[in-house]
Image (cartoon, rainbow, N blue to C red):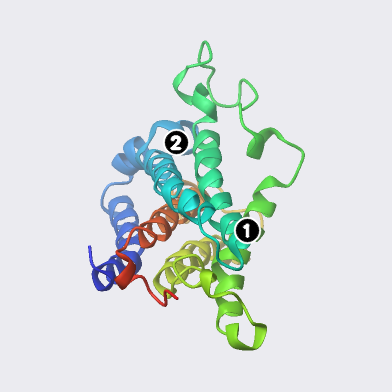
Amino acid sequence: MTKRILDWVTVALPVALLALLVTTYLIDPRFYLTYVLEFSQRETQVVEIITFACLLLAGLLLVAPTFRLLRSNDRGKWLTIGIVGSLCLAGFFVAGEEIDWGDSYGLWGDEAPKGDAPALNLHNSSPLPIKSVGNLYLAGIFFGLPALWAFRGKLNLPAVLAPPVVPSIPVVIAMGIAFGWRFLKNVYRMFYEEGPRPDDPAGSFYWGFIEQINEHKEMLIAVALVFYALYHHLPRQHAPEQA
């Protein structure tokens, strides 16, 4: 795959996925809730499966770039390893979290209906603000680092940080779509302080679609991570701004 094609697909796929989610719900809410995303059974539905698969794939794709950076002698080597290596580990870790480390599929004993037993993951069961920390971590890498890279001359940043280590613009846009989509729920909540009641005409759309937008966001983040990893596998001569 050439860089130009990858640039276009990186931006277009998140938009296409969102359009498909909205269209599917509007055409057939029952199908959407049965197979795509519904709170009580989401762990085994399409959105969650895509999220898990993309996180795992991103982790796998970043293993080779991490070891390649370990073998380099460039200035800033350990900073680049910290960025790429942490995203590699994050892909594996969050993939495990998404399926409750196998418990979603009954790998650790008898399955319990959702809500009848504590989730076997940290992001739902830990008192620590893991989701907030994760969001800050992603924002720092995918929005903060590219902003700093724009001033690399003044900041004397090492050339080894050049994209694909620092996320390229299409990846930043893809991640921005993921974070931006989440705000649609906030807009809805501006009109319904507690969220609309299920028997409210607006309530069915809220509880059936809007309320689970966080899961859409997680899926889009996972997709963006895959594209971030793919840029590391472009031929050297095509890697954007490679120094």
Compared across the picture, whether 243 is left or right of 79 comes to: left
Q: Residue furthest top?
A: 110
Query: Which quadrant of the structure image shows residue 156?
Result: bottom right
For disc 2, the marked residue is: 42
Is residue 200 visible in the rendered image? The answer is no
In the image, residue 184 lies at what x, y percent? 51, 64
Give the residue type at disc 2.
Arg
Is residue 150 visible in the rendered image? The answer is yes
Mark 1 Cα-neighbour bin, 10 Å: few <14, some 14–19, many ≥20 = some
Query: Which quadrant of the structure image shows residue 34?
Result: top left
Determine the residue positioned at 59% across, 61% down: 77
In the image, residue 19 lies at what x, y percent? 31, 61
Residue 105 - label: none
128, 80: nearer the viewer = 80
In the image, residue 234 lies at what x, y percent? 31, 63
Determine the residue positioned at 66% across, 83% down: 155
Q: Is residue 85 above or below residue 101?
A: below
Compared across the picture, whether 63 is left or right of 80 comes to: left
Q: Earlier in the sequence, mark 1 or mark 2?
A: 2
Give the residue type at disc 1.
Trp
Q: Is residue 112 above or below residue 160?
A: above
Mark 2 Cα-neighbour bin, 10 Å: few <14, some 14–19, many ≥20 = many
In the image, residue 118 lies at what x, y percent? 65, 24
Residue 78 - label: 1
1 or 2: mark nearer the eye = 1
23, 9: nearer the viewer = 9
